[in-house]
Image (cartoon, rainbow, N blue to C red):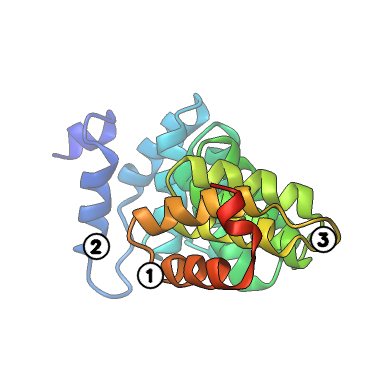
Amino acid sequence: MRKLLKYGIVTGIYASLYATSLSANEALPDFVYNGYIEKAEIGDRKAMFFLGLLNEQGVAPDASLENAVFWYEKSAEAGNLDGAIAAARIYQAEGNIERAYEMHRIAASLGSSEANFNLGFAHEYGNGLDKDLNLAKEYYRKAAEAGLIIAMRQLGIIYWQGEGEKPDIPSAKTWLEKAAQAGDKASISLLNRLKNADENFEKSE
């Protein structure tokens, strides 16, 4: 087993399981950790991610949250979605909103619908980012088109409310219906309210 770990034949999930089997205050053996270091240094983004994970779990030699973030970011910059999400989560918890959203942008570029939603939400309400409804709609649309129901609903609400521009009832109806068809009870309720409140509803059909 030691030889397999040393030469990187055992996958990250096995190393992670091995790490969780350690008793309290017991560090991961150096040869296991160093095997990941070797792979990370030649550009293995999964190895970078697992170095972050092992540091966050507190089982890496000289483990620290700072080391975890370092390796999560390295993996994100190399194209690892899980690393971007993990780094964003830690930065968010620390209150470093600027860095958190930088990681969300990387995650969004790698296809995360949740990251696109988070960016849309931040731009809609000016939460850590400039308030910009056009950018909010752009990010929500990406998340909605990827199937994220809450993004469909939020996009529908923005189109309905207008906020500084004329409400777009047909677009509001389109996105709320998509969310409702996916089983979103809140969107079903919003559609009923829209139908009762706006005389343009029927004209949009």
Mark 1, secondary structure of its residue: helix
Q: Nearer the viewer, residue 75 or 177?
A: 177
**Where does the image place residue 147, in percent across and percent down from the top left?**
42, 45
Task: Kindly indicate the quadrant of the structure image that contains residue 172.
Answer: bottom right
Q: Which mark is residue 20?
A: 2
Q: Of marks 2 and 3, which one's residue comes earlier in the chain?
A: 2
- Tell me which residue sits at (50%, 40%) in the image: 145
**Where does the image place residue 199, in percent across and percent down from the top left?**
64, 64
Left or right of 138, for residue 182: left
Label 3 is placed on what type of residue? Lys
Is 172 placed above or below 9 here? below
Mark 3, secondary structure of its residue: loop
Task: Count residues near mark 1 (Cα–Cα under 10 Å), then give few for <14, some for 14-19, many for 20+.
Answer: few
Q: Of marks 3 and 1, which one's residue comes earlier in the chain?
A: 3
Is residue 16 in view from this perspective?
Answer: yes
Q: CA distance from mark 2 to mark 1?
A: 39 Å
Mark 2, secondary structure of its residue: helix
Q: Which mark is residue 185?
A: 1
- Tell me which residue sits at (35%, 54%) in the image: 181
Dot in front, 2 or 1: 1
Residue that mark 3 sits on: 131
- Tell me which residue sits at (45%, 46%) in the image: 82
Is 9 placed above or below 96 here? above
Is residue 67 in view from this perspective?
Answer: no
